C-alpha cells in the first residue's frame, strides 16, 4: 500500500480524466506508474549496459556480424 499526496492541479486533472473515462483515479494512477516504471527500468538497464561496454565487460556487434550469425548474410534473396 502506498499513499501519495498530489499537487492540487494534478489532483484536479486526474479527477477530470477519471470522470471523463469512467474509471477510478486509482486505476489511472496505477496505469501511469506502471508505464513510467517500465521506462525507468529500461533506461537504467541501458545505462548499466553502456557502463559494462565501457569497462570491456560487454561487447557490441556490427550489423554484418549479426546478419552472418543469423544466416542473413546472403543478400541475393
Image (tube, rainbow, N blue to C red):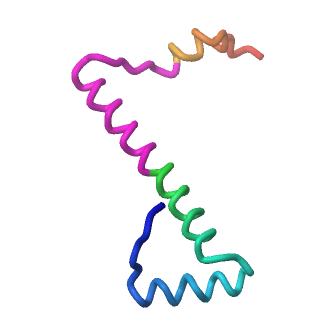
Q: Is residue 70 above or below residue 46?
A: above
Q: Left or right: where does residue 43 sit relative to residue 21?
A: left
Question: How many numbered callouts?
Answer: 0
Give coordinates of residue 13: x percent, y percent.
53, 86
Give coordinates of residue 68: x percent, y percent.
58, 10
Give coordinates of residue 9: x percent, y percent.
44, 89
Q: Which residues are magenta?
A: 40-63
Is 50 magenta? The answer is: yes
The residue positioned 22% from the left and 22% from the top of the image is 55
Viewer-nearest residue: 53 or 13: 13
Q: Left or right: where does residue 5 sit relative to residue 36?
A: left
The residue positioned 31% from the left and 32% from the top of the image is 50
Q: Left or right: where does residue 12 sit relative to residue 73?
A: left
The quadrant the C terminus occupies is top right
Give coordinates of residue 74: x percent, y percent.
68, 11
Viewer-nearest residue: 19 or 74: 19
Q: Quadrant of residue 30?
A: bottom right
Is 55 magenta? The answer is: yes
**Residue most extreme to the right:** 77
Amino acid at each position: 500500500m502506498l499513499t501519495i499526496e498530489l499537487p492540487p492541479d494534478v489532483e484536479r486533472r486526474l479527477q477530470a480524466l477519471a470522470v471523463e473515462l469512467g474509471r477510478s483515479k486509482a486505476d489511472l494512477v496505477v496505469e501511469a506508474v506502471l508505464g513510467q516504471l517500465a521506462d525507468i527500468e529500461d533506461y537504467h538497464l541501458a545505462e548499466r549496459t553502456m557502463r559494462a561496454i565501457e569497462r570491456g565487460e560487454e561487447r557490441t556487434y556490427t550489423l554484418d556480424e549479426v546478419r552472418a550469425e543469423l544466416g542473413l548474410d546472403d543478400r541475393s534473396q
